């Protein structure tokens, strides 16, 4: 029963966080002491915790511990018999702590520590099944891509420190919001690099789907509550620091536009449920970034919370399916509606939320995002109107594709020839059901946009209808789009070119190091040895030769003496 | 031509010379053929010469006093250590001591010489007996050959020196250092002629010192000679010629010529480099020390080259430590040779473990020569010898010296590593050594203690030498 | 107090060498640990605070004609180095508490550690140099005799190579010291200010070999990979720091104006080293060689920091040096354990799946690797971060375009560092386990040593303040304001 201990620890953590965070949920006035430096140089870095929660932080931190606790409970059944369960569960707790550190502080260094520890935890957890080559490769890729992007955050913090004279986020933002924002392009671009990596946006998007060999609960954790959420949070949190820079916002918008569409398209053609859900995450995150770039970070974070709930639901549900059929391939599923009714109902809710159907939370928050984009398209947002318009239509297209693949996945997994199967253990079902409830419950209090509600519902219904029609006509939903199946070959640089270049460069360095750089020492040594040998030969005990050398020496000396004077 | 000889200053040399004769006579009349017996008169003479030297302390220039003291002490060290050769029947102890002391008398005279004729006489007095010493071992063809090489090279160099002296005389009309100095100051001779004269004169001294390209006799002579004779040549003989060089250049030329300074610097650089390179591949301790003594001569010459501007002390201090370390090494090797019959590295393997009283001083001496802690004094004298070179602005020479410190370490360290290596085969157990070997060992340990003491208190040396 | 702290390990080291046949290895190592512990405590206690220029000063006459004095003391620069050295020396001795230890090895380790302590405590140039050289020959013996048991020829060659490189450097250093001291007439480090540019060049060259800066680094991989575990730890943990400490003290602080002219080259060499060594690591098969090369990269960050000549740079250099000592110490202890067990450090030969075969050993290695690649929250990060910050702030010496380019390349180097450590972890820690008869998990002694280092790494990583605070510039004035949005 020791495996429940870790769930217990997580529960304690969740309770503590709840006590801490719930009072901070609402807007409030607060007094806060921010160290502001009027000198030119910021102070030396330290790791004083500087705990502080913005309302949005409070929401995210609650989501984090909530999903974290559910994942722990889920894992007791899903992975409870694994020989390395202990390290697995402990790393999850560390993961949650890291996320709390990212969200719950104003000290940028603490944020950074959390940020990168999260990267490490995801590396360790994705690679939990390190016996398999895919897990090793996926873990390494995830770690490398995110860590390289993290360097952007490191530099961003340095620039913030130099610009505002403090490493306190609140302090810097207060200065910035008083109209004193400086270096916003540099800071923005660096932050952009960081979040693009962390939240798997184009062009650093490919690690997230490749991380699928990790245990499914971990996937849920990463996709819903931690890792990728941190990217959106950071982009939203730091928005005041770079809102002045159109360049940054346009770049963010372009990245978001590309990512949401390709993510959705890739999700559409997948033959693997888990991987499809992963691409869906990529696409949904892009939607949030689009909202941020349009000047409405709150819409982005709202959708983040909603997405956290229903994506965790979908992944955990997917885990239940895998538990039953033993694989995440869509071909292995189908017709599980009867055998797994609870999972079916819960996941239906999840897919509905993903497609943006009322009254799930996905419906409301997606509409908020679209609303923000529309503002932008009208030129009322932070983006130039042209960019805003393109982004808006791309988002609408994405909404359509999203509904299509959601319907497709739902149909393939649960309909068709009924299959034998059984429900997952209760420890796994409970979190799924709770998340399904949350997917509804979170709708309460969400803003409602009537116009968009109708439009997006229309799109979603249309898309679903198309899929159902195709399903009933053809009986199957395989999509033959080789280019999309290959994911547009966007991953080639990372799998082929960069490793090859690095390898070749490394080989070259080793060779040059040995034969080039070392030449002076080796050459010196062999030169010395050669001279030494030559001296031995000259030292022939032949007196005549000695006399010759001496005479030559005398002549040389005398000549030198004469010339010199 | 009037050559004034201050017999008072020549006192120690005279006593040594007299000691040489007495040693020979004692041996002739009391042919006990024991080294201890034959050595006693020499020892007594050297001690007496030392006492005389101290008596004259206020009359002789400081540098001469220090040099003479180094020479006498060095010879004494060799004489006492020579007891180790007790059982070499092919070596007549009487002649050995006679020749040794004659040479030493020449050495002492050389550093007190104040005119070129005395210098020449002293040079010959130093050279000829040492040639005989090299070939003293009867029936040893190698020794004869070495002596022969040594002799020929010596003759050539003396001839060149003579030419130089006659040129100098032609230019200045005097043979006294002081006179030469005065005359050169007023002379209107072209500089090139003067420099040729000076260079030719100096060559004889460079030869004894073993500077490149006059070094080639050294490895042959050292390897062929009885080992302590090699020690004598590498220390006393070198010290004498260095002293004479310093005195001659200092007084006769008033250190006024940049020409010879630069030339000497070049010679020094080449000498230390060639010497070190030659030593790199040696696998015999004596061969290694022979080449290393060439390299050390280079360091000494570097100090001489800049002595014009910055005085003698660097050369003297370096010389003192060099002589001490070198003698310790040779004496220790003499013990090894006596007990094991060879000084090849293979024979020395693990000496510091099997026979610490010999091996550890030997290693210490090598480290001193390398200028490496724990032999701090070696390092300090390297500092001392580099300092004037840098101060004189000859940075290139200082860098060459630095590189040579590295080169030197390459083979000194190899030697030390051999000494500390795990011995191959059965470990050698020294049978209770005869008394004469114990004396030599005692001398070695004494010398090593000297190095240790100087390493602990470098002040001891640096304060008391001019 | 400093004299005692130095003489205890020196004396015991000598005694152990002399009585190597009469004590057992375990007793010798226990005694050695006690000696180093005593030294550590003394050095910790000698500190009198940041405001005192020299703590625990000892100043007596030594070689008066040269102006050399026995001048020892602890400054705010040397104190962290001293504590780190004492800790590593202590851990090396603890590591040697085993039956098959040779007492002479313990003696040499003590002498090496004590010499390094001597260097860090010296305030006289000649004394500094004597200590600097003193450790070399013992280290030669450590590598040549106790090194890689499978390659007697190679370890001897590596040892000699190490020695000759270092000695070349230190001979140049000696010339530089002479050059600095002779016009000044004093050898007191804290009194000297300024010298000829040539002297500074020689001094920097001398330390550059030791640090090592590219392209003077080629001695390092051989020496580190052939040395025994304690030898590698001392080489990487302590010896390289002699170089960086020298650059700080004799370069940036003693000859500021001259060093300023050389600093751009030092910085460039450092950053080239970061990228160069990272690439070299990526192609290594030998684990110890890999760690050795990674040291070059870490020292590159330190060199970059030093060459900014700012307070932040100083903090970065000291922090980076200390952190590298602990982290690389841990990595070498871990890889040494692997080599002890399997007889090889080749990653191909070690085989996959150490996580399963020797879990705690694998965890120790991975922890070290993660610290070494600069994960925030562990010690390795702050040194690199401050180094980047120092270069970003440019300082008075470098030019802005140059410094920022260097920052860019340094960042690239960090990325590559991650890549090669991930590769190494993938090659040996993860994967289908191929059991080997040598597989044994950490014993208590090894676990103790490694956990001490791990605790140190975490402590420095979580609380960099006390160390960094030593170098906080006096001009910092923080003000606190109440804000209400």
Image (cartoon, coloured by chain):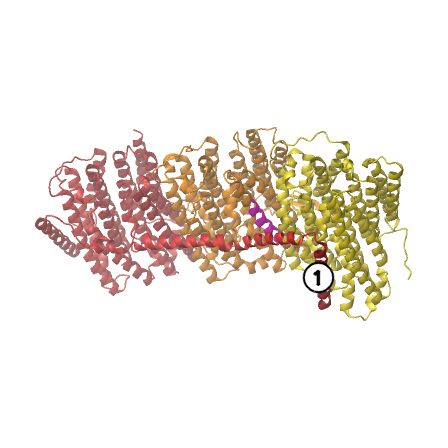
Chain colours: A red, B yellow, C orange
Q: Name the residue under label 1.
A: A552
Task: Chain letter for mark 1, please.
Answer: A
Indicate whether residue C163 is drawn in magenta. Answer: yes
Residue A22, located in which quarter of the rendered image? top left
Answer left or right for A515 relative to B123.
left
Quick one: B43 or C291, which is closer to the camera? B43
Instruction: Identify the residue at image location x=11%, y=49%.
Output: A471
User: Which SS type dominates the magenta stretch?
Assistant: helix
Answer left or right for B183 relative to A58.
right
Answer left or right for C405 relative to B108.
left
Say which quadrant the N terminus of chain C sits in: top right
- Residue B65 visible? The answer is no
Percent coordinates x, y for residue C100 in the rendering = 53, 31
Highlighted range, magenta: C159-173
Percent coordinates x, y for residue B7 in the rendering = 90, 52
Is B119 rendered above or below residue A226?
below
Quick one: B56 or A446, which is closer to the camera? B56
């Amino acid at each position: 029963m020791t495996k429940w201990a870790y769930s217990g620890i997580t529960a304690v953590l969740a309770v503590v966080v709840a006590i801490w965070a719930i009072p901070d949920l609402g807007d409030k006035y607060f007094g806060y002491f921010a160290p502001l430096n009027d000198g030119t140089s910021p102070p030396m870095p330290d790791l004083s915790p500087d705990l502080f929660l913005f309302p949005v932080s409070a929401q995210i931190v609650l989501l984090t511990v909530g999903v974290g606790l559910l994942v722990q409970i889920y894992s007791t059944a899903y992975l409870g018999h694994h020989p390395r369960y202990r390290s697995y569960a402990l790393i999850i707790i560390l993961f949650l702590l890291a996320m709390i550190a990212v969200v719950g502080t104003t000290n940028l260094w603490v944020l950074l520590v959390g940020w990168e520890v999260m990267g490490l935890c995801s590396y360790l957890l994705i690679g939990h099944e390190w016996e398999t080559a895919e897990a090793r490769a996926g873990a390494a890729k995830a770690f490398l891509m995110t860590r390289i992007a993290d360097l952007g955050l490191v530099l961003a913090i340095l620039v913030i420190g130099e610009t505002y004279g403090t490493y306190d986020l609140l302090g810097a933002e207060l200065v910035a919001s008083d109209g004193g924002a400086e270096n916003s392009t540099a800071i923005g671009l660096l932050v952009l690099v960081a979040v693009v990596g962390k939240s798997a946006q184009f062009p650093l998007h490919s690690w997230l789907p490749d991380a699928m060999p990790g245990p499914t609960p971990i996937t849920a954790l990463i996709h819903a509550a931690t890792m990728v959420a941190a990217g959106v949070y950071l982009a939203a949190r730091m928005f005041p620091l770079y809102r002045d820079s159109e360049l940054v916002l346009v770049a963010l918008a372009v990245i978001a536009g590309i990512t949401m569409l390709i993510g959705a398209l890739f999700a559409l053609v997948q033959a693997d449920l888990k991987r499809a859900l992963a691409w869906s995450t990529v696409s949904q995150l892009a939607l949030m970034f689009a909202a941020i770039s349009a000047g409405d970070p709150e819409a982005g974070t709202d959708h983040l919370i909603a997405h956290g709930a229903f994506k965790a639901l979908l992944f955990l549900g997917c885990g239940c399916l895998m538990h039953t059929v033993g694989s995440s391939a869509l071909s292995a599923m189908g017709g599980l509606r009867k055998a797994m009714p609870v999972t079916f109902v819960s996941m239906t809710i999840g897919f509905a939320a993903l497609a943006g159907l009322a009254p799930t939370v996905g419906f409301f928050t997606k509409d908020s995002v679209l609303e923000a984009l529309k503002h932008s398209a009208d030129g009322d947002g932070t983006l130039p109107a042209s960019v805003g318009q393109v982004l808006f239509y791309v988002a609408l297209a994405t909404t359509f594709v999203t509904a299509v693949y959601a319907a497709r996945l739902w149909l393939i997994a649960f309909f068709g020839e009924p299959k034998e199967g059984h429900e997952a253990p209760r420890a796994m079902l409970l979190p799924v059901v709770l998340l399904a409830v949350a997917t509804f419950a979170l709708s309460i209090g969400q803003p409602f946009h009537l116009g968009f509600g109708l439009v997006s519902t229309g799109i979603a219904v249309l898309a679903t209808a198309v899929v159902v029609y195709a399903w009933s006509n053809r009986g199957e939903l395989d999509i033959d789009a080789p280019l999309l199946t290959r994911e547009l070959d966007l991953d080639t640089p990372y799998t082929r070119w960069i490793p090859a270049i690095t390898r070749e460069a490394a080989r070259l360095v080793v060779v040059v190091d040995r034969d080039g750089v070392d030449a002076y020492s080796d050459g010196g040594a062999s030169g010395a040895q050669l001279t030494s040998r030559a001296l031995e030969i000259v030292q022939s005990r032949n007196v005549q030769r000695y006399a010759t050398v001496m005479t030559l020496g005398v002549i040389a000396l005398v000549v030198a003496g004469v010339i010199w004077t | 031509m009037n050559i004034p000889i201050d017999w008072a200053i020549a006192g120690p040399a005279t006593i040594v010379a007299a000691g040489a004769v007495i040693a020979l006579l004692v041996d002739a009349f009391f042919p006990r053929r024991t080294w201890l017996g034959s050595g006693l008169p020499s020892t007594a003479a050297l001690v007496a010469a030392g006492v005389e030297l101290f008596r004259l302390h206020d009359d002789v220039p400081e540098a001469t006093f220090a040099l003479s003291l180094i020479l006498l002490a060095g010879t004494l060290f060799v004489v006492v250590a020579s007891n180790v050769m007790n059982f070499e029947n092919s070596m007549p102890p009487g002649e050995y001591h006679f020749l040794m002391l004659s040479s030493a008398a020449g050495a002492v005279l050389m550093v007190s010489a104040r005119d070129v004729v005395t210098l020449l006489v002293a040079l010959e007095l130093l050279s000829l007996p040492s040639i005989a010493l090299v070939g003293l071992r009867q029936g040893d063809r190698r020794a004869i050959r070495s002596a022969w090489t040594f002799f020929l090279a010596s003759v050539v160099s003396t001839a060149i020196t003579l030419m130089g002296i006659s040129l100098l005389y032609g230019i200045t009309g005097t043979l006294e250092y002081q006179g030469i100095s005065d005359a050169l100051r007023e002379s209107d001779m072209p500089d090139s002629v003067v420099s040729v004269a000076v260079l030719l004169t100096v060559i004889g001294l460079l030869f004894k010192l073993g500077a490149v390209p006059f070094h080639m006799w050294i490895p042959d002579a050292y390897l062929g000679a009885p080992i302590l004779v090699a020690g004598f040549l590498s220390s006393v003989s070198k010290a004498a010629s260095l002293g004479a060089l310093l005195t001659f250049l200092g007084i006769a030329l008033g250190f006024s010529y940049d020409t010879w300074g630069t030339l000497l610097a070049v010679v020094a650089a080449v000498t230390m480099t060639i010497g070190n390179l030659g030593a790199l591949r040696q696998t015999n301790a004596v061969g290694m020390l022979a080449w290393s003594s060439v390299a050390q001569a280079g360091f000494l010459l570097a100090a001489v080259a800049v002595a014009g501007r910055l005085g003698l002390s660097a050369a003297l201090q370096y010389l003192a430590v060099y002589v001490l370390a070198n003698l310790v090494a040779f004496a220790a090797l003499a013990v090894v040779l006596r007990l094991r019959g060879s000084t090849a590295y293979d024979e020395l393997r693990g000496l510091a473990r099997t026979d610490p009283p010999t091996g550890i001083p030997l290693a210490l001496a090598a480290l001193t020569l390398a200028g490496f802690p724990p032999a701090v004094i070696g390092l300090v004298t390297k500092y001392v010898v580099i300092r004037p070179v840098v101060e004189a602005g000859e940075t290139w020479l200082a860098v060459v010296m630095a590189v040579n410190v590295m080169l030197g370490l390459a083979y000194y360290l190899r030697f030390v590593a051999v000494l500390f290596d795990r011995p191959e085969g059965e470990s050698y157990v020294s049978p209770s050594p005869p008394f004469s070997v114990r004396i030599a060992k005692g001398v070695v340990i004494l010398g090593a203690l000297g190095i240790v003491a100087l390493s602990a208190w470098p002040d001891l040396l640096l304060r008391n030498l001019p | 107090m400093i004299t005692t702290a130095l003489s205890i390990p020196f004396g015991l080291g000598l005694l152990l060498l002399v009585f190597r046949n009469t004590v057992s290895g375990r007793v010798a190592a226990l005694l050695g640990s006690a000696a180093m512990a005593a030294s550590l405590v003394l050095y910790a206690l000698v500190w009198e605070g940041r405001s005192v220029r020299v703590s625990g000063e000892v100043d007596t006459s030594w070689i008066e004609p040269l102006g050399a004095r026995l001048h020892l003391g602890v400054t705010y620069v040397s104190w962290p180095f001293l504590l780190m050295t004492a800790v590593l020396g202590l851990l090396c001795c603890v590591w040697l508490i085993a039956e098959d230890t040779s007492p002479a090895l313990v003696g040499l380790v003590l002498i090496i550690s004590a010499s390094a302590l001597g260097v860090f405590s010296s305030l006289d140039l000649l004394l500094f140099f004597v200590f600097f050289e003193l450790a070399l020959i013992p280290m030669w013996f450590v590598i040549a005799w106790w090194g890689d048991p499978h390659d007697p020829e190679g370890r001897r060659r590596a040892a000699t190579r190490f020695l000759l490189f270092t000695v070349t450097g230190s001979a140049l250093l000696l010339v530089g010291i002479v050059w600095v001291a002779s016009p000044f007439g004093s050898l007191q480090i804290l009194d000297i200010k300024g010298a000829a540019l040539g002297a500074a060049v020689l001094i920097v060259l001398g330390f550059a070999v030791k640090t090592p800066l590219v392209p003077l680094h080629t001695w390092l991989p051989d020496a580190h990979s052939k040395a025994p575990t304690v030898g590698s730890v001392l080489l990487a943990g302590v010896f390289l720091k002699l170089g960086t400490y020298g650059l700080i003290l004799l370069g940036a602080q003693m000859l500021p104006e001259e060093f300023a002219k050389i600093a751009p080259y030092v910085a460039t060499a450092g950053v080239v080293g970061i990228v160069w060594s990272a690439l070299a690591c990526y192609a290594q098969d030998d684990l110890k060689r890999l760690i050795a090369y990674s040291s070059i990269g870490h020292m590159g960050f330190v060199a970059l920091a030093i060459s900014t000549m700012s307070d932040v740079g100083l903090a970065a250099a000291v922090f980076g040096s200390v952190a590298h000592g602990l982290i690389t110490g841990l990595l070498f202890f871990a890889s040494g354990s692997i080599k002890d067990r399997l007889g090889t450090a080749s990653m191909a030969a070690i085989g996959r799946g150490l996580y399963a075969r020797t879990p705690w050993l694998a965890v120790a290695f991975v922890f070290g690797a993660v610290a070494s690649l600069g994960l925030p929250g562990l010690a390795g990060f702050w040194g690199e971060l401050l180094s980047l910050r120092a270069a970003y702030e440019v300082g008075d010496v470098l030019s802005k375009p140059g410094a920022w380019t260097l920052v860019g390349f340094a960042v690239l180097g960090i990325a590559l560092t991650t890549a090669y450590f991930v590769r190494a972890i993938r090659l040996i820690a993860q994967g289908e386990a191929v059991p080997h008869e040598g597989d044994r998990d950490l014993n208590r002694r090894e676990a103790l040593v490694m956990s001490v280092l791990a605790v140190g790494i975490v402590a420095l990583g979580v609380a960099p303040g006390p160390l960094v605070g030593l170098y906080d510039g006096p001009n910092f004035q923080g003000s606190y304001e109440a804000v209400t949005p």
